[in-house]
Image (spheres, rainbow, N blue to C red):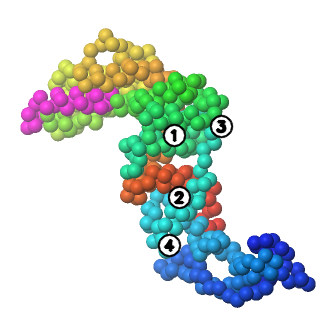
Amino acid sequence: MDYRPKACIKCGILNEKNNTKIINYGWRFTNVKLPRSGERDVKVRLKKRYFKCLECGSYFLAQTSLTTRNHTLSRNTELSCLEKLTETVSMHHIATKLNISSTTVLRILHSYGNSVKPHYNWLPAVINMDEIKSTRDAKGAMSFVFMDGMKRQFTDILESRTIEDLTKYFKRYTKSARDRVQIIITDMNYTYPKLVETVFPNAIVITDRFHIVNNVVVGFNQTRIRIMKKFAPSNIKYKALKRYWKLLLKPNGKLDISVYRNFTNIHGLNTENSVVETLLGFNKELNHAYEALQAVMSSVRLRDNSRLRIVLDPSQEYPEEMEKHLASLRTNQSFIENALRYKYSNGPLEGTNNKLKVLKRVAYGFKSFLNFRLRIHLMFSVKKVPSRKAARH
Ligand SMILES: [Zn+2]
């Protein structure tokens, strides 16, 4: 590799034809790693001209667009590495594939990290909040994830979800950014609503609909299991209650009433509907819990707050397990009524969370939260990275 330099890269003096300031000063050899071709490693042994500047007395090498200055890794390999980091594969896998060291993969990840800086003067108007199991070194057992509910875009992940840490984090945003936030959608975790009082004065809280229903489903199943265990495991009632739990969770109006067939452990020919009636006939408490479950499910489905208020009325008495779960709905009834009033849910966050879970699994539980967070940011900004084709050329 040889050429006539236009100027000294150290002092900038021009190397004019009639007045040569830069002289050739022998050769140097470097090895450049290219992306693997099939199963073969590809290396270029590059013979580069070494120059001396007579003006400032410094030495420098011929420059190539093949590598970043002072690196022996080709730009193409760096791009392939960045691209692979956006996929749900382990860093070890990337290092092996590209024939580079794990340290190099980390260096490339961290070089990207410099561009991951939150903009503290802007927050989305609708924020989805959720959590995911943390990395081993993280401060809390669960990490806090939040995203833009309108654009359905991942915003950031925090290693702790305590009220103190969340307050501290969000307080870094400007007052006008925080004032912009109008809606916060959460699961049944009631740490997050407290943020409304301290950092998001203009926001309302919506409990995610899935979590409302799930809460009563858990209460109902606990009741069913307690009642099932009143019978011996050999008893036909025990077996039926164990076998047909899914039918009990199905919306009552959607049970089939026309097809008669054999159901194991239930006497005679039955429809789905008559099976449910038989099961509920085993026990009064179970029947009562079922009514509450179905009432909550249909209130949510039909967005019927007046019906929900009747179920949650404290004068009603339910089996203890059901009561416990309905009580937690009562404590935050206004957030739940908001869920029936507005169309927002945490649905959009599910896809993001699934992607994060896959990434965590393939990476064998990230040791470092910092690396995990960087990779997530890289993964969700993948559109900014050159396409597959571009990276190869
Ligand atoms: Zn010079």
**Distance in Å between CA atoms under marks 3 and 4:** 39 Å
**Observer-nearest of 325 and 296:** 325
Q: Earlier in the sequence, mark 1 or mark 2?
A: 2
Residue underneath mark 4: 100
* Mark toward the start of the polypeptide (3 vs 4): 4
Q: What range of the chain is rendered magenta?
A: 216-236
Residues at marks 3 and 2, CA–CA distance in whole angstroms = 27 Å
For residue 279, which numbered disc appears in the image? Answer: none
Classify 45 as above or below 185.
below
Contact, mark 3 vs mark 4 (Cβ under 8 Å): no
* Residue annotated with mark 3: 121
Q: Nearer the viewer, residue 277 or 142?
A: 142
| Mark 4 residue crowding within 10 angstroms, few (<14) / some (14–19) / many (20+) | some
Q: Amino acid at mark 4?
A: Ile
Q: Marks 2 and 1: in contact by CB < 8 Å? A: no
Please give the residue where the numbered disc 2 appears in the rendered image: 86
User: SS at mark 4?
Assistant: loop
Q: Please, what is the three-letter code of the amino acid marked with disc 1?
A: Phe
> What residue is shown with label 1?
146
Q: Position of residue 189 (x, y in %)?
A: 40, 31
